[in-house]
Image (cartoon, rainbow, N blue to C red):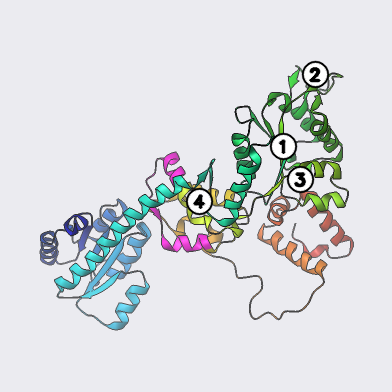
Amino acid sequence: MAATVRKNLSICVLDDEPDLVETTTARLDREGFVAVGTTHPLEALEKVRLGGCKVVLCDLKMPGMDGLAFLEKALHQDPGVYVILVTGYYTMDSAIESVKRGAYDYLCKPLDLARLVKTLDELAHTFSQRSQVRGLEQRLLENLQFHGIVARSPAMLEVFDLVRKIARHYSNVLITGPTGAGKELVARAIHEMSPAGQGRFAVCNCSALVDTLLESQLFGHMRGSFTGATETRAGLFEYANGGTVFLDEIGETSLTMQAKLLRVIQNREIQRVGSPEVRKVDVRLIAATNRDLRTEAMNGRFREDLFYRLSSIEIRVPGLIDRSEDVPLLTQYFLKKYNEAYGKAFQGISRRAQMVLLQYEWPGNVRELENVISSAAITATSDFLDVKDLPKHMQRPERAAIGPDETWRPLPLDEVRGIHIQRVLEMCRGNRVRAAQVLGIGRTSLYRFLKRSQKHGEGGRYVC
């Protein structure tokens, strides 16, 4: 077993003395390791870049490029490589400095073969364990997929349980949660598990269309009913008859459109634009929003009767910050997805990058995480994604908004809200649409608040 494990550990011996390279390589070969040697640092770096070695045994003092410079370049090429530095001038300070910079071990010349073999056996065992863990993680990833949704956090397992319970009942559902949390995936899961699962699943983003176009999209129109209507078309409700219609961002619809949607729910009938004919439809309606519709209804911005019709069954999808346990699993899932999509062969993510991903707050939720992994997979050149492959704002996180040196003082809620909105706007570089998404409110709500603040002379605080 030990011999097999050693055979799986490829080693590159780098030293400016050819005799020493040849001797060390031969000794490692006799111990059962796969070892190659070179006197050229650039050749060793190329082996690291191509994945030709997992461990580099590197001399500290070499002309042209010393061991510490090689260590930095090797870790830049492949964050998963292990570098063992060797020197004839051992000091405790230099050993500590080398380990701080990322060296796995620091040995002195002449090499103690027993000590070296013990260190390499530890690494070989580590690589063997990682290979087994990757296999287990792959099986775990397959087992933890719920109709295309990957999660293992208690919060999401509760969502899955609720979906199972309600899916078989032919009723309307309201899905709430922040932007990018996966509301559409939950809606698809409900549809696939429902009696209407064999029917069509039609999606409409209500925030992307003005009322006239939204009405035509949902209910259809007759030829000549408005400028540009050159032919008669069925709407999504007719298209998905016997299936499901998913209305994303329903909180962005006007009161007039809400009244028409209420009629569909109550009477199961629609009218095409420009037609007096009433058509019966049999669809399951699933709506989603990142707004608090209860508050919107209380303030007269959303019809109460429609809200109560929709919210008889409500599913809250938590943001990624509330289920950080899912970040490693989702990262692995997206890495596999983009490995296949881009023809790459990433082995994983470096420990440094994993810590950055776990500590980040993910204002854009799962969608933002997917975009980060997708972009990193395009630009990365080594076998492991590293911190340098992540977006700049994640590589250099900003100082916390409130530090320990700031003096806390009680503030009115309106002022706290204003400060928070200001900071979010600054984070989004003045992009109001993005800021509204991060805040979890509609654009009109944000504009209304900014307008009210300007009216009271506070508008200068907002960067827009």
Q: Return the residue at label 2.
A: 222
Give above or below for 222 relative to 317: above
Residue 335 visible in the snapshot: no
Where does label 3 land, which residue?
311
Give the CA distance from mark 4 to mark 1: 30 Å
How far across and how far down the image is residue 99, in percent? 33, 73
Disc 4 and disc 3 in contact, CB within 8 angstroms: no
Disc 1 designates what residue?
171
Residue 341 lies within the magenta run: yes
Q: Nearer the viewer, residue 184 or 14?
A: 184
Amino acid type at image mark 2: Met
What span is colored magenta in the figure? Answer: 336-358
Question: Could you tell me if the residues under marks 2 and 4 are in contact, i.e. CB atoms within 8 Å?
Answer: no
Taking the magenta stretch, the answer to whether it contains residue 272 is: no
Indicate which disc, 4 or 3, sits on the residue closer to the N terminus. 3
Q: Is residue 276 left or right of residue 123?
A: right
The foreground one among 330 and 356 is 330
Mark with earlier residue (2, 4): 2
Q: Nearer the viewer, mark 1 or mark 3?
A: 1
**The residue tagged with tag 2: helix, strand or loop?**
loop
